Image (cartoon, helix red, strand yellow):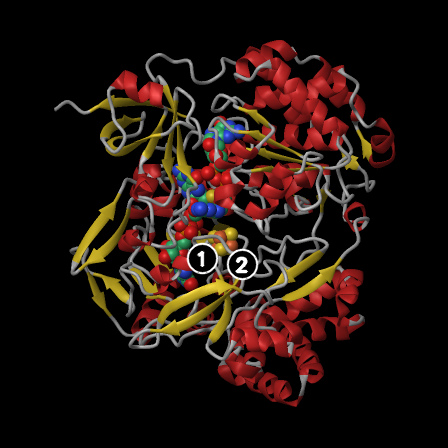
Amino acid sequence: MTAEIATERGADWKPTACILCECNCGILVKLGGEDGRRFEQIRGDKAHPASKGYTCQKALRLDHYQNGRGERVLSPLRRRADGSFEEIDWDTAIAEVAARLAAVRDTYGGETILYYGGGGQGNHLGGFYGTATLRAFGAKFRSSAIAQEKTGEAWVNGLMLGTPVRGDFEHCEVAVFVGKNPWQSHSFPHARLTLRNIAKDPARSLIVIDPRRTETAELAEFHLQVRPGRDAWLLAAMGAILVEEQLIDTAWLGVHASGLEDVVAALSAVPIADYCRISGVEESLVRAATRRIAAALSVAVFEDLGVQMNRHSTLVSYLEKLVWLLTGNLGQPGGQYAPATFVPIVRASRNELDPRTAPRSPVVGARILTGLIPCNVIPDEILTDHPKRYRALIVESGNPAHSLADSQRMREAIAMLDVVVAIDVFMTETARLADYVLPAATQFEKYEATFFNFEFPRNVFHLRRPLLTPPEGPLPEPEIHARLVEAAGVFKDAELEPLRAAARRGRREFAAAFAEATKANPRLGSVAPVVLYRTLGETLPNGAAAAAALWPVAHRCASMSPDSVRRAGFGEGLDAGENLFDAIVAGPSGVVFAVDDYDETLRRIQTDDGRVKLTIPELLGELEALRTEVPPGDDPAWPFMLSAGERRSFTANTIIRDPSWRKIDADIALRVSPSDAARIGVVDGGQARLTTKRASAIVAVAVDEAMAAGHLALPNGLGLDHLEGAQRIRTGVGPNEFTASEDRDPWVGTPWHKSIPARLEAIPN
Ligand SMILES: Nc1nc2c(c(=O)[nH]1)N[C@H]1C(S)=C(S)[C@@H](COP(=O)(O)OP(=O)(O)OC[C@H]3O[C@@H](n4cnc5c(=O)[nH]c(N)nc54)[C@H](O)[C@@H]3O)O[C@H]1N2
Ligand SMILES: Nc1nc2c(c(=O)[nH]1)N[C@H]1C(S)=C(S)[C@@H](COP(=O)(O)OP(=O)(O)OC[C@H]3O[C@@H](n4cnc5c(=O)[nH]c(N)nc54)[C@H](O)[C@@H]3O)O[C@H]1N2
Ligand code: SF4
Ligand SMILES: [Mo]
């Protein structure tokens, strides 16, 4: 750390990161208050190599997570027969949970234990240790929120490129956002600054595809105001225009891609004018935006929930990628890049991509991608008498009874299980349905990190240090998993003694001892994170035992991306992994673990022949079938399309439960266009009845000029309880009361949350 940064921070400013979105901006926190535990002041950390001092308004309100009125769980809890909970001590909780999971394994097989979660926007270390618990009890299947948003894109990226990619918005000439509102949702560094820079530069353009005139669309040169759920027709038209107007970069494609003929044939057959009309966007505007993309030196694209949680989501992911691939926007500044990997979090494996070996879920046979069961099929996998139905559920840092599609069916499914264990900081909607609740320390009371490491050309990993000690009761997840694994009897503590002794002598000796021990007893290797935590962990400085599981990760990263790690200054060979690991443990504001050049992206393409595969036959079939499909949204019985779960200035999934963290109350209301509001007779600040095929409820209404007629938007992160005195108070209604688990993508099971047929009615006086 330089002297300058040390003074700027001063002694009382402690470095950590914001945990509210995947950017994880570095922040400095000044603690205060009577007990010294309040987050009195928060500001951006200039020493953080990715965010460099940037934050948005949400980070400044993090005290509401740490010290808000969410119902914090302070002791392990066990459900009584009458549904109430009693406090139990940790030894009892661990012994009983282990016995219950073992009983499920012995009676029905370990594969009937499902693990959901493992981390939200700011915490992935716990889920890493959770892998050891799964192995200890023979569990095979896991799921997380990623399997309700990113698996379609992961499949398409896997088939076409063999690697995840992201857009370089800082340097692009043209930025395209498809169902993404980065002004509110961020997802790349310095989002608002970057958007403003593009908007004010006459040489650059912003293209936004969104039914709402969002804050991002407001800045855009081209706003393609698509009708909800009709992006497939729009993107097909854009691809077809590239072909028809001969805007394809054939020179680049000739060198870097294969399968162009099939794609050109399929796109040539698209009736452009019809598809533009179906999409609701003027053909001249679609053509102008497409030409702008083709004319640009570089185009960066981000598709997100507006299309990933929508009809034809996997097809749309494919068409979106075709648009930037056909125009040659891969592997150059301002185009798409493949970041170096620390932990592969959204990467489909070769096994998963190969139809002969692709794993499937045990009951309904749903495709498993990135190791995850599609969230929408979880109820189908439980509410059945199939012999392999799940019998037990471990939920860690997730709130599936609230966040996943169809809360009603999810609650029914959870009630059918033999045992449910929730590991959470708070008494969540899911924890309340559990048999055991194991209280976790908050993300500021322990070592934490995320694996959302997508920066380029300098990629960053940040191991955060605790700011506070946990109160009596809650434990960090690595300790919880270590105790569960020990209770499962996977190893005897005496087996760890030689490893501990070796760790005290040095890292080299430890490496040799670890290799030997796991060879002699493969069960030790199967729970490696816990073994490392209990051995190597005890020798790490500043109580950083939880970092121990990152030791093999650092080595794997250094061996998989040796040039990148060397360029980041960590040397070569075994030293590189060791040096990287030491730097991670030593660096309180994050570490640049990989430095790349732009060509690295092309080298990271992992298809059979190292070229981009343009053809995905299944999806070309779906493209063809659009011709005869009745587009959604014209059913007179359901005059509205509801987007359930919009990101706003004060939403953050279900991480903050205290509603007073919001500075704007209207943030929680259903948005309606002025013309619809007038027609129905609802007013801004009033209430109305919202109905879908799944539910009907009264909601607060905000009349919003940015909404298109016929479109409704309900925010995410509502319908959460917090405590006022001893009373639980609920704010708003959970978006997934209105959603249905069967409404999902045929390939990967992602939900159609953003175009739900709905009715909205005034409430009679
Ligand atoms: N403030 C805030 N930021 C967040 C989060 C948060 O909770 N709050 N959560 C984080 C997480 S987990 C994620 S995954 C990201 C998600 O980030 P985004 O995907 O940007 O979030 P959303 O607001 O859900 O959806 C984006 C846009 O999709 C549009 N949309 C709705 N229907 C359609 C449609 O049919 N077609 C198209 N093209 N667009 C449509 C909506 O109008 C909206 O503007 O945000 C992250 N950042
Ligand atoms: N209808 C609809 N539904 C949606 C969306 C939508 O747009 N529309 N968006 C979806 C998206 S993109 C996402 S990512 C999901 C998110 O849904 P989930 O996967 O359920 O994640 P979160 O809501 O972030 O829940 C995080 C949980 O972690 C807990 N937690 C916080 N810190 C810690 C910790 O240190 N340790 C432990 N053990 N727990 C902790 C919080 O209390 C909370 O219960 O929601 C999804 N649901
Ligand atoms: S952009 Fe995301 S991580 Fe950064 S301060 Fe805002 S919510 Fe937090
Ligand atoms: Mo998400």
Cβ of mark 2 under 8 Å from ligand 3: the answer is yes
Seen in the image, is 336 located left or right of residue 389?
Answer: right
Seen in the image, is 435 located left or right of residue 516?
Answer: left
Image coordinates of residue 237 in percent, x first then y, are 64, 18
The residue shown at (33%, 54%) is 661
Asked whether residue 401 appears in the rendered view, the answer is yes
State which quadrant residue 84 falls in. Answer: bottom left
Which residue is identified by label 1? 59
Whether residues under marks 1 and 2 lie with C-beta atoms below 8 angstroms apart, the answer is yes
Mark 2: secondary structure: loop
Which residue is identified by label 2? 25
Q: What residue type is labelled 2?
A: Cys
Mark 1: secondary structure: helix
> What separation in Å lies between label 1 and label 2 (alpha carbons)?
8 Å
Above/below status of 288 relative to 548: above
Circle 2 packing at 10 Å, graded few (<14), some (14-19), many (20+), is many
Image coordinates of residue 114 in percent, x first then y, are 44, 52
Above/below status of 603 relative to 612: below
Asked whether residue 621 appears in the rendered view, the answer is no
The residue shown at (70%, 12%) is 269
